[in-house]
Amino acid sequence: MSLELQGLGVSRGIAIGKAHILFHNQLDVREYLVAKDDVEQEVSRLELATAQAKAQLKSILDNIPANAPADVSSFIDTHMLMLQDSSLTKIPVEMIRNRRCNAEWALQLQRDALINVFDEMDDPYLRTRRNDVDHVVNRIHRLLADEGHTDIAIDGRLKGAIIIAEDLTPADTMLMQHQGVAAFVTEHGGATSHTTILARSLGIPAIVGVGSLRRYIQDNEPLIVDGETGTLIAGADSSTFQEYQQRLIRFKQHIASLSRYKSQPSQTRDGKKIFLHANADSPEDITTISNSGAQGIGLYRTEFLYMNRTSPPEEEEQVAAYRKVAEGMDSQYVTIRTFDLGADKTVDGGRNLNQTVTNPALGLRAIRLCLKQPNMFRTQLRAILRASAFGKIKIMFPMISNTQELLQAQHLLQRCKFELDKEGLEYDRHIETGAMIEIPASAICAEMFAKQVDFLSIGTNDLIQYTLAIDRIDDHVNYLYDPLHPAVLRLIQITLEAGKKHNIPVSMCGEMAGDPRYTRLLLAMGLENFSMHPNALLEIKQIINETNLGQLPKNALQILNMSDPFDAELLLEQINSPTH
Ligand code: PEP
Ligand code: MG
């Protein structure tokens, strides 16, 4: 009898293979006091384990192929940095010396303190980075417990396997990619977890958040993974296997056929030009972006520059980073979003977390924090302006909720320009500014903002979160996430109309823009500027290039008034049907 388990499909593709179960034994962290005379020996034990952990990661980093996506090494780099950070090197040692805790206990106490800090964070991406702490601490714990071999053995056994795990570390993921695994399925994780991001970058099908995997799946049993629908099938009959074999072949053909779109312009069959941009997080993304055929960067998330460090980046460091992106993109625009850090991630890049915030997503984040920390904001604005002398840059302000915020931001920008003038430093005098529409109130009043800026950009990830009152990273309410909800669609429409009326471009840079299910609907609504993960770009271009706007169903926009989600799905299918 077959068994179907449902999770969140986070990286598309079909995989058929045998299960390889990869659950680490639960580590028993021993807690005891060490004798006074043994304290220094205990400190050495911890230091040795930390050094071994570093050596293990270094060896993995050294073996990353040159053509691997930048995400892969950056995650492992992050772990290396954590292993060198005083929060893991000094504080547990002090605990051993001052409190005479054993090494495992000291490390565990510090792990709990760091996890608390991450749990308080507002930004969903950064909150999921609590996993980094766990992965790094776990590695040291295993070494302390003398489970020396903490990584996956490279012995070729994993070729074509479907990995079934509780969660995966970046190092695991990397080693498995080397061995040609077919898919990942994990119990934990969400849309922004490590496994998700890496699996997408590596193009490996993945499902996360499948509860009780361990209970249902046995080692070596044949499985089918559908990374799009999030379905894991065990014990399938031969006709199901055949059906998925066919789908796998079609999927591979489809991916292979996309490369021809790289050099094609993106425009609908009836000649409407559509602009396709990429989202980026670091200068290292440029190679992937150039290979995707993107026409520029529609969202450059700068908060990653502020992560994993004890103080925010200085102006010079920021100028260098932004300049590298601008120069790397050559004659194409890079839209730099000012830092979208959260309530707790202030001047020290996320460590000075004394306040407790009840609703961090509704708290002091993004532009609110920028304006509350004018010096830090000024440093960034000056850096962006200075980098604009070396390439084409636009500035975008996140999470704008009223016109005052926008005016204040623009006022600060103006001041920075005066300063640079006085100092004789070059910048683009006509640099464009834009506002992100991520809050329902701002979408409803998009016209107010349209009068003040050169462009608008719809951040659907937050817009959907705030419209439907669902925390982006809360697994319990994930099922309510619905880009087709009429409220979401109407807010998008209002924003598009505001742009049209005031003659400014409106872009969309949330996940919805890179989801092929919504491309035709968004085209029908009048969206002309998309920005997305570079891996999604060619597929979206293919849909655009195969669409004849004039032939889309006349009733397509009725979806904005559909009270029944089932009817909305049916109409979407009709819009997406190949005959249109
Ligand atoms: C969004 O909210 O849709 C967006 C693009 O910004 P981020 O995901 O960085 O919050
Ligand atoms: Mg956002």
Image (cartoon, helix red, strand yellow):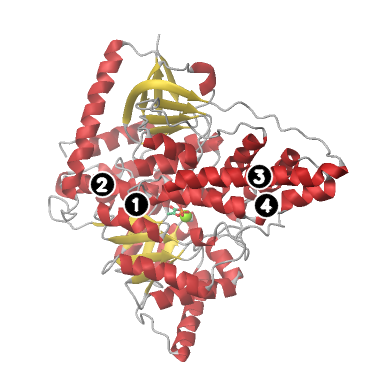
Tag in front: 2 or 4: 4
Mark 3 and mark 4 lie on one chain; the one further toward the N terminus is 3
* Residue position for label 4: 89
Picture coordinates of residue 549, whole percent (x, y): 18, 49
The answer to whether 349 is drawn above or below residue 391 in the figure is above
Marker disc for residue 540: 2
Q: Residues within 10 Å of mark 1 (few under 14, many from 20)?
A: many
Three-letter amino acid code of the residue under disc 3: Leu
The answer to whether 2 is drawn above or below residue 152 in the figure is above
Query: Quadrant of the rendered structure where residue 444 is?
Result: bottom left
**Quarter the C terminus occupies:** top left
Is disc 3 in contact with disc 4, using a CB cutoff of under 8 Å?
A: no
Q: Residue at x 53, y 75 (%)?
A: 378
The answer to whether 168 is drawn above or below residue 527 in the figure is above
Query: Quadrant of the rendered structure where residue 276 is?
Result: bottom left
Q: Secondary structure at mark 2?
A: helix
Q: Residue at x 64, y 32 (%)?
A: 146
Mark 2 and mark 4 lie on one chain; the one further toward the N terminus is 4
Three-letter amino acid code of the residue under disc 4: Thr
Picture coordinates of residue 573, whole percent (x, y): 27, 34
* Left or right of 324 in this view: 128: right
Is disc 1 in contact with disc 4, using a CB cutoff of under 8 Å?
A: no
Three-letter amino acid code of the residue under disc 1: Met
Tag in front: 1 or 4: 4
Is disc 2 in contact with disc 1, using a CB cutoff of under 8 Å?
A: yes
Mark 3 and mark 1 lie on one chain; the one further toward the N terminus is 3
Q: Nearer the viewer, residue 538 or 349?
A: 349
Mark 1 and mark 4 lie on one chain; the one further toward the N terminus is 4
Tag in front: 2 or 3: 3
Q: Nearer the viewer, residue 244 or 557?
A: 244
Q: Secondary structure at mark 4?
A: helix
Real-space Cα distance between discs 1 and 4? 38 Å
